[in-house]
């Protein structure tokens, strides 16, 4: 059985700004396992995200094949995984997504000079706590970017991250991934087939 799960991303006032969406192969425990090769979200996202933005992980293959362009650009933020190589095809795919109205996030970001072309196209940088200060000093001020701090697991971490000037926050302290209910299963299966999703997923939830 296939499911969609989501984890909240909140602002400094702890109001929901967006949800990161995950693909799940089991409802046990309510925690999703991610399949980064294939986005698994409905074409209409309102019933999944309650009218908030949807952060959707895409692999290099999904980027260059144009799978993301089936998603609604006004409500979708494309997360470029840290495993994606900044090839010419990837850079051009991200440029096209920006032209189409999508926003771009760089996931689990650790700056390297060869990633500058992706930084120049990004709207959001996602960094894991506590490895945030160095990333901030390297990329902040180069262009208008917003930062999402992941793996916030305690109140003390949240307070410190807010004090450091980050924009948005994600992690178990703020909400674990939960299965989205109320979506017809045949619709979920149809959408999964649309994105070529077959087989099983065994990984633990990502972006936590």
Image: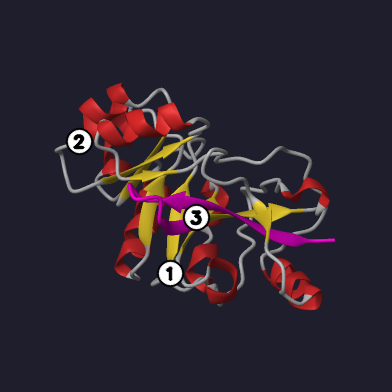
Mark 3 or 2, nearer chain start: 3
Residue 9: x, y in percent? 46, 51
Foreground residue among 177 and 85:
177
> How far is disc 2 from disc 1 in space, using C-alphas?
25 Å
SS category of the residue bearing label 3:
helix
Would you say residue 14 sits in the magenta stretch?
Answer: yes
Q: Which mark is residue 121?
A: none
Residue drawn at (68%, 64%) of the image? 180
Residue 63 badge: 3
Q: Residues within 10 Å of mark 1 (few under 14, many from 20)?
A: many
Q: Circle 1 sits in a helix, a strand or a loop, which is it?
A: loop
**Is tag 2's residue or tag 1's residue first in the polypeptide sequence?**
1
Q: Tell me which residue sits at (48%, 69%) in the image.
A: 69
Disc 2 secondary structure class? loop
- Residues under labels 1 and 3: Cα distance? 17 Å
Residue 128 visible to an observer of this rendering: no
Could you say where residue 22 lies in the image, as x and y percent from the top left? 63, 53
Residue 75 numbered mark, or none? 1
Q: Is residue 202 visible?
A: yes
Label 2 sits on residue? 140
Asked if residue 122 lies in the magenta stretch, the reply is no
- Residues drawn in magenta: 1-19
């Amino acid at each position: 059985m296939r499911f969609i799960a989501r984890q909240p991303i909140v602002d400094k006032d702890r109001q929901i700004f967006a949800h990161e969406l995950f693909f799940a192969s089991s409802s046990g425990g309510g925690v999703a396992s991610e399949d980064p090769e294939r986005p698994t979200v409905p074409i209409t996202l309102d019933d999944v995200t309650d009218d908030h933005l949807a952060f959707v992980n895409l692999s290099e293959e999904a980027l260059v094949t144009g799978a993301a362009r089936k998603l609604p650009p006004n409500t979708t933020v494309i997360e470029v995984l840290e495993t994606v190589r900044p090839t010419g095809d990837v850079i051009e795919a991200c440029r096209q997504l920006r032209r189409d109205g999508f926003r771009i996030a760089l996931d689990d970001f650790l700056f390297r000079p060869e990633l500058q072309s992706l930084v120049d196209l990004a709207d959001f940088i996602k960094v894991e706590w506590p490895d945030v200060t160095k990333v901030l000093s390297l990329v902040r001020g180069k262009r208008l970017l917003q930062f999402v701090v992941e793996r916030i697991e305690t109140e003390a971490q949240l307070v410190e991250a807010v004090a450091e000037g980050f924009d948005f926050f994600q992690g178990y302290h703020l909400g674990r991934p939960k299965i989205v209910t109320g979506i017809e299963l045949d619709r979920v299966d149809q959408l999964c087939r649309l994105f070529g999703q077959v087989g099983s997923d065994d990984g633990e939830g990502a972006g936590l």
